[in-house]
Image: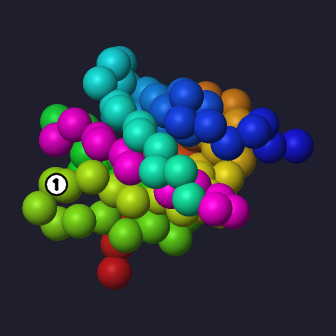
Amino acid sequence: MVPTVTAAALRMALERITEAATEAVPASIRVATAALDPRPLYVVSIPLEFRAEVCHYLALYVDLSFPPDGGPVIVTFDQARAVMELAYRTSTSDLASSSTTVVTN
């Protein structure tokens, strides 16, 4: 079961993913909510120092668009649920091991 989607819950899920994907302490991820009916949008700011790794990891599992200029990521309610499911369906060690997988063409 997925917890309720709030800005705080989404930020915590992103921090969990960031910690596993980068081994950094993600103290500055910011999430704001744009209240829309029937479901909100979330505006997520991921710091540049670990943005590339986090966006790459999220792109493997969640259908998100990432602005190339480093701007905020707009996340729908359903995408936020998918991020939270990704963060909490596995242990941190499983997240870390899947983030180190190298894809070659």
Coloring scheme used: rainbow
Q: Closest to the observer: 34 or 29?
A: 34
Q: Quadrant of residue 47?
A: top left
**How many numbered circles does the render carry?**
1
Q: Residue at x 53, y 36 (%)?
A: 7
Counting other residues with Cα less than 10 Å from the Cα at mark 1, is it few (<14), some (14-19), or many (20 or more)?
A: few
Q: Does residue 44 appear in the picture of this structure?
A: yes
The spot of residue 69 in percent (x, y) is 11, 61
Is 40 magenta? The answer is: yes
Q: Closest to the observer: 94 or 41?
A: 41
Q: Quadrant of residue 38?
A: bottom right
Q: Which residues are magenta?
A: 37-48
Q: Closest to the observer: 82 or 100?
A: 82
Q: Which residue is mark 1?
A: 70
The spot of residue 35 in percent (x, y) is 53, 51
Q: Residue at x 67, y 52 (%)?
A: 81
Q: Secondary structure at mark 1?
A: loop
Is 28 magenta? The answer is: no
The spot of residue 64 in percent (x, y) is 45, 67
Left or right: residue 53 compared with residue 9 = left
Q: Vertically, is 63 above or below 51?
A: below
